[in-house]
Amino acid sequence: MSKYTVDKNGYYGPFGGAYIPEMLYPNVEELRKNYLSIIEDKTFKNDFHQLLKDYVGRPSPLYFAKRLSEKYQTNIFLKREDLNHTGAHKINNTIGQILLAERLGKKRIIAETGAGQHGVATATVCALKGMECVVYMGEVDIKRQAPNVARMKMMGATVIPATSGSRTLKDATNEALRDWINHPLDTHYIIGSVVGPHPYPDMVARFQSVISQETRTQLFTHTKKEFPDYAIACVGGGSNASGMFYHFLDDPEVKLIAVEAAGLGTDTEKTAATTKLGKEGVLHGSRSLLMQSPDGQVIEPYSISAGLDYPGIGPQHAWLFKSERALYAQATDEEAMQAAKLLTQLEGIIPAIESAHALAYLEKQTWKKEETLVICLSGRGDKDLDNYMKYFDL
Ligand SMILES: *Cc1c(COP(=O)(O)O)cnc(C)c1O
């Protein structure tokens, strides 16, 4: 058993657990009792991998980025999650959870979404399976993310605005939890990252672990080695990073690097750099690191990339940070945008701005000619074109 994955009580070192209201206990307990036996079942595995193959388009390629490698005088491979159906890694998790919901006999799916990416990935698998889908989204985010709202509606989902508080992600999360309390029997709540009460962080990491599982085989084909010197990923809640790290956690020769969004800088209030500025506390049902004011109020995070402006990180990441198994770095808006431009012009790949934070780490260290780096390209940049147009005056 790895000391970096969840223990039998639902913890990663001091982090994790299930800090939930009494009324949610039956829902979470049903999941906790059943998730491992379901996802380790042979027919579940077959169904999961069949859909990943035929519907999502996996395995996603591991691409040797030749011109980018020349620029940094090293060997850079990109794990191409941007080529997945719906454009990012999030679909790996929603496919897994919809199959699990089916096995649990659920008829209705709820989700919360901030930027709308997880809402779209959820609405997609609900259409695929003909399940009712209700997505909670802050009223402010609904206005900011109109194309994703349209995608969800086109796929038959109901999008319900959260109108309380700051009318953003955390209010949508509260509404989703309230819904789940009121529908304990027929409804499954699909959480979109490695956050929330146990068993969600472990369950989502297992579904996303296909990223590093494929990487090992593919890297061997390219280099005759299964292990890179570095595995690098961006972190919002931490699901693509957890997936990229999963099958390397117990191999200390693989250095793990997670890149948070520094926004306008970690010395400003416009940032989402949780490990740099966060403190221990409870957020969305688990103990982790989160950004909070001295009196314990959760601070609204900021990043140019909507997918990274989450005020915490999942409990496994808090543990990887505290135990120093992984290095947590930060990239500003400007650094990420320049990295996105560089990748586009050297390789003809427009990355999601989230993923560009991982690419920005290339500037932060000197690399050796013989080293091998794998960077998780978590998503494609089509959704960010408006941002790129404004930023670069295109
Ligand atoms: C949502 C998203 C992220 C951040 O989420 P994690 O759970 O940290 O992976 C990163 N990249 C893309 C493309 C996303 O859509």
Image: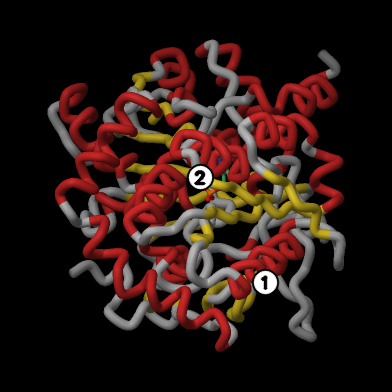
- The quarter of the image that holds ligand 1 is top right
Q: Quadrant of residue 14?
A: bottom left
Q: Which residue is mark 1?
A: 178
Judging depth in this view, the residue of 144 and 236 nearest the camera is 144
Against 8, residue 82 (above or below) is above
40 shown above or below 124: below
Rendering coords of residue 283 (x, y %): 62, 74
Q: Quadrant of the N terminus?
A: bottom left
Instruction: Find residue 309 and report its horizontal and vertical position in percent.
Output: 69, 52
Tell me the quadrant of the picture where the C terminus can be found.
Answer: top right
Number of dots carrying numbers: 2
Q: Is residue 252 above or below residue 222?
A: below
Residue at 30%, 42% in the rendered image: 210
The secondary structure type at the circle numbered 2 is loop
On the image, the x and y values in percent for residue 184 come to: 52, 72
Mark drawn on residue 131: 2
